[in-house]
C-alpha cells in the first residue's frame, strides 16, 4: 500500500470510494441525512474548492482503495471524508491514511463522525 496526494483527474475515483463506503451509514444515521449518492459530485467539487485536499491509499496495482481529506482552517486542521472501499476494509488502510495525514500538519487536528457510526468511533 502506498499513500499519496490525489490528483485533480481522480475526482471520479474519490467520489466512487466515498459513496461505496458511505453505504455503511444506511440505517445507522438519521434517515433524513442518508441519501444515495451520499455525496454528489457537485458537493465533492465544492469541498475541493473550499480547500479539502485528498490523500489516497493505493493497492499493489495502483488503484485507489481509500481516501481521506485534510483541510487547513488556520489554527486547526480538519480530517474530512475518511472512506475506504468496502472490499478493502479492515486491512489497515484507514489507519495508514490517518497516520500519514497527522504527520503532515503541525496544527491541532479535529475529526468528527456520526455518533451512530460505532466502527468509525472505535477507529478514531
Image (cartoon, rainbow, N blue to C red):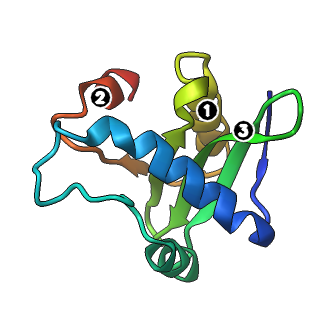
Q: CA distance from mark 3 to mark 2?
A: 20 Å
- Residue 2 in the image: x percent, y percent? 82, 34
| Label 2, residues with CA under 10 Å away: few <14, some 14-19, many ≥20 | few
Residue 82 in the image: above or below residue 44 = above
Pointer 3 with pointer 1, Cβ within 8 A? no
Foreground disc of the pair 3, 1 = 3
Q: Of label 1 and label 2, which has the lower sequence position?
A: 1
Sooner in the amino-acid sequence: mark 3 or mark 1: 3
Q: Quadrant of residue 69?
A: bottom right
- For the N terminus, the image quarter is top right
Q: Residue at x 70, y 46 (%)?
A: 56
Residue sitting nearer the eye, 70 or 83: 83
Distance of label 1 from label 2 (alpha carbons): 16 Å
State how far apart marks 3 and 1 are (Cα): 12 Å
What residue is drawn where x is 32% and y is 21%? 122
Residue nearest the viewer, comparing 112 with 103: 112
> Residue 99: horizontal and vertical position, in percent?
61, 32
- Location of residue 35 in the rendering, given as x and y in whole percent from the top left corner: 26, 59
According to the picture, the residue beneath numbered tag 1 turns out to be: 99
Q: Which residue position holds label 3? A: 57
Amino acid at each position: 500500500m502506498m499513500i499519496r496526494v490525489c490528483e485533480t483527474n481522480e475526482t471520479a475515483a474519490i467520489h466512487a470510494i466515498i459513496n461505496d463506503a458511505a453505504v455503511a451509514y444506511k440505517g445507522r444515521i438519521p434517515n433524513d441525512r442518508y441519501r444515495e449518492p451520499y455525496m454528489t459530485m457537485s458537493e465533492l467539487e465544492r469541498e475541493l474548492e473550499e480547500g479539502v485536499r485528498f490523500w489516497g491509499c493505493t493497492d499493489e496495482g495502483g488503484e485507489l482503495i481509500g481516501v481521506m481529506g485534510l483541510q487547513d482552517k488556520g489554527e486547526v486542521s480538519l480530517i474530512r471524508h475518511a472512506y475506504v472501499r468496502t472490499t478493502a476494509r479492515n486491512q489497515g488502510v484507514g489507519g495508514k491514511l490517518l497516520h500519514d495525514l497527522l504527520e503532515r500538519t503541525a496544527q491541532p487536528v479535529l475529526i468528527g463522525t456520526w455518533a451512530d457510526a460505532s466502527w468509525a468511533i472505535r477507529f478514531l
